[in-house]
Amino acid sequence: MVQPGLSVDQMRIVRFLRDPATFGGRRPAYFNTAVSHLFVDGPHLYVLHKPVRCDGYSCQTPEERWHWCEAQCMRAVPRTGRGPARPLPIVRRANRFFLGGPGSIQDWVLKISCASVAVDSGLITLNQAA
């Protein structure tokens, strides 16, 4: 079943990211929000933005989601020039999905260090890195 506003391709990526094989046999915690799919695997949070558009803001295409990931990374970069988050491509090669590496880019996730994330009243926000 396809969720409203979600393409079949992105639902396949959600299944890939929910699969324990993606994370070395560990089942990630999964959260479905209004605008993102969140996957927590040990020290990392992976954010797959949904293809949404509202109030002049659009993440409907993989390219727009890459720009969103990049903008989030720049917001979290401290004075040292290194941040706790980075865009990570989801690629397809040999008819399978992979996190990063060579292949045809299908979508983007924001990979965030859990040490840099604050959860308060159900909101997940990036902290400034120390």
Image: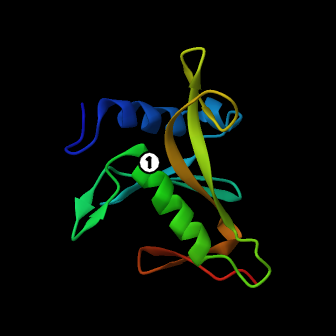
x then y, percent, for residue 13: 46, 35
Residue at 19 percent of width and 44 percent of height: 4
x then y, percent, for residue 89: 59, 42
x then y, percent, for residue 66: 50, 53
Residue at 75 percent of width and 85 percent of height: 79
Q: Is residue 3 left or right of residue 95?
A: left
User: Which amino acid lies under the numbered mark 1 shown in the image of this protein?
Assistant: Glu
Q: From the image, which quarter does the N terminus lie in?
A: top left
Q: What colouring does the structure picture have?
A: rainbow
Picture layout, residue 44 above or below residue 95: below
Picture layout, residue 9 above or below residue 62: above
Could you say which is closer to the camera, residue 101 or residue 39? Answer: 101
Q: From the image, which quarter does the C terminus lie in?
A: bottom right
Residue, disc 1: 63
Check disc 1: other Cα within 10 Å, few if <14, some if 14-19, many if 20+: some
Picture layout, residue 88 above or below residue 92: below
Numbered-mark total:
1
